Image (spheres, rainbow, N blue to C red):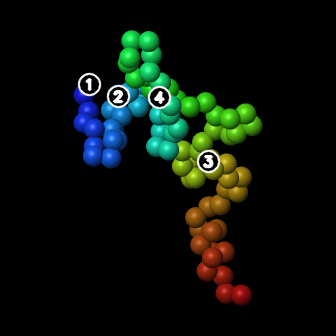
Amino acid sequence: MATTLTSKGQVTIPKRIRDAMRLLPGAAVEFSVNAAGEVVLHPRKAAKGASAPVRDRFDAVRGRADVHWRTDELMKLLRADD
């Protein structure tokens, strides 16, 4: 699998590799060079006490609401004349 180096020295990690390593946008990675001179990509370990990165602010709260409004009840509340 090949990719092209940009003028800024950047490359795109192919999707197949991102998926295999479970890398999400914003994930921290580290590079190392092994004894054979090959570059190895490692997901960076989180610091002690750091929480796992949240993929999306809505994913973080999805399914956690404990208020079960029915649409008609909510519309009545929102449209109530005070």
- Tell me where residue 40 appears, x and y as whole percent: 43, 22
Residue at label 3? 60
Residue 31's tag is: 4
Q: Residues within 10 Å of mark 3 (few under 14, many from 20)?
A: few
- Tell me where residue 11 appears, x and y as whole percent: 33, 38
Three-letter code, disc 2: Arg
Residue at label 2? 16
| Residue 21 visible (yes or no) | no
Separation of residues labelled 3 and 2 (CA atoms):
25 Å
The answer to which of 75 and 66 lies nearer the viewer is 66
Residue at label 1? 1
Three-letter code, disc 1: Met
Separation of residues labelled 4 and 3 (CA atoms):
29 Å
Residue 76's tag is: none
Query: Which callout, 2 or 1, points to the residue nearer the camera?
Result: 1
**Quarter of the image with the N terminus in it:** top left
Three-letter code, disc 4: Phe
Separation of residues labelled 2 and 1 (CA atoms):
10 Å
Q: Residue at x 47, y 34 (%)?
A: 23
Q: What element carries label 2?
A: helix
- Please identify the quarter of the rendering in which residue 75 is found: bottom right
The answer to which of 81 and 38 lies nearer the viewer is 38
